[in-house]
Image (cartoon, rainbow, N blue to C red):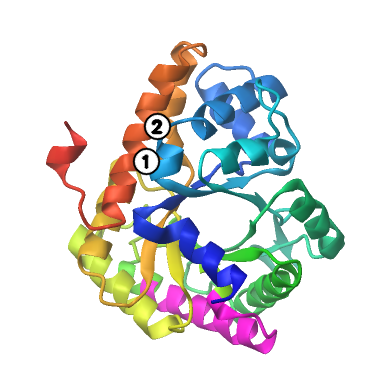
């Protein structure tokens, strides 16, 4: 077993998942301001440190994706943030793309940037303690999208990124996100997601990326958020598992789903149904941002000094998702 394969498995073993705390300063500012908290470096750190110090880190969270600002910060107890995460039983990771920009030749689509100077940045992040990384490609669905250009360009970027990350002895999270935005059907989502994932693996293989040393972070198969034809959780699970079996090579050690605009409960319930019916051979878990943090953020905003209360809310959500990653969640356990 390679070191990268070992880290990938340890991040997702026994129902553990990934806390996506890699919101850019702009995104985190919007979230804090939505609960009437000023977005200062101190407040951003205080909220994140509260989560990183919680008891569920050891039991439920195998990895934490950080943003450039956070990986360089020091906690209130003078620990470097990657050291704080490691001491609580989890691996620190880092988002390394620089965001989605307009795709030349297809102005309604996006291409993720950040390859320039990436090798040097990766060395810096590795020296700061990062064990894994993340890069997100985004694709929107409509009658004409995602285009072949978007699918090809983003797959190529994800593969180049992954090769550089493994060269630097870290595990790349490969995140091709087909967005929920729109009125498309679940069938459309299935077809487009399959096409996107297959192209990603074609490129990963061409770039000689070790598939045993990556984690795939895809979307679940869902109807668009404006669709009149929503599907049941059982159908979400069936279509999602079918998509994985037909699109993802068996060497990949694990899948960590993004929540992609689902509510906290929807993200947990769908993950649970996927795992109850998991016949793929993959470890299937979660890499959630809002769907892990939102309730804790609302609670914390009422009294930022109530660390214990905030951690209790976060621990509950993390525990529910870890049960779901083992197919053991239920509405009864949720409401206890």
Q: Which mark is residue 314?
A: 2
Q: Position of residue 63 (x, y in %)?
A: 53, 50
165 left or right of 16? Answer: right
- One can see residue 232 in this view: no
- Residue 69 image-quadrant placement: top right
Is 195 magenta? The answer is: yes
Q: Residue at x 75, y 55 (%)?
A: 126
The one nearer the camera, 77 or 306, is 77
**Label 2 residue SS:** helix
Could you tell me if the residues under marks 2 and 1 are in contact, i.e. CB atoms within 8 Å? yes
Q: What is the magenta segment's predominant secondary structure? A: helix
Magenta residues span: 190-212
Is 71 magenta? The answer is: no
Q: Residue at x 63, y 17 (%)?
A: 38
Compared with residue 104, is residue 207 higher up or lower down, i.e. above or below?
below
Compared with residue 230, is residue 166 higher up or lower down, i.e. above or below?
below
Q: Position of residue 290 (x, y in %)?
A: 46, 40
């Amino acid at each position: 077993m390679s070191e990268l394969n070992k880290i990938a498995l340890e991040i997702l073993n026994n129902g553990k998942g990934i806390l996506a705390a890699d919101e850019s300063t702009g995104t985190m500012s919007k979230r804090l301001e939505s609960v009437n908290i000023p977005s200062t470096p101190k407040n951003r750190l205080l909220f994140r440190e509260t989560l990183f110090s919680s008891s569920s880190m050891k039991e439920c969270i195998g990895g934490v994706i950080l943003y450039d600002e956070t990986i360089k910060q020091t906690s209130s107890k003078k620990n470097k943030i990657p050291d704080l995460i490691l001491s609580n039983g989890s691996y620190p990771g880092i988002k390394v793309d620089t965001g989605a920009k307009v795709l030349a030749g297809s102005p309604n689509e996006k291409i993720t940037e950040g390859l320039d100077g990436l090798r040097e940045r990766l060395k810096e992040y590795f020296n700061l303690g990062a064990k894994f990384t993340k890069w997100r490609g985004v694709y929107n669905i409509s009658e004409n999208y995602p285009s072949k250009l978007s699918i090809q360009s983003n797959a190529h970027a994800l593969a180049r990124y992954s090769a550089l990350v493994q060269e630097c002895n870290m595990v790349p999270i490969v995140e091709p996100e087909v967005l929920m935005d729109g009125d498309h059907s679940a069938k459309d989502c299935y077809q487009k997601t399959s096409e996107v994932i297959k192209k990603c693996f074609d490129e990963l293989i061409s770039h000689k990326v070790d598939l045993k040393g990556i984690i795939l972070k895809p979307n679940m198969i869902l109807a668009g958020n404006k669709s009149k034809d929503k599907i049941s959780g059982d159908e979400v699970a069936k279509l999602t598992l079918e998509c994985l079996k037909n699109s993802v090579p068996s060497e990949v050690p694990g899948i960590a789903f993004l929540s992609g605009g689902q509510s906290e409960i929807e993200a947990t319930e769908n993950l649970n149904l996927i795992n109850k019916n998991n016949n793929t051979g993959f470890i299937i878990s979660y890499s959630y941002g809002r769907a892990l943090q939102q309730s804790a953020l609302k609670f914390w905003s009422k009294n930022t000094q109530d660390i214990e209360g905030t951690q209790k809310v976060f621990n509950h959500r993390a525990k529910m998702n870890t049960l779901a990653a083992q197919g053991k969640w239920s509405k009864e356990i949720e409401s206890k």
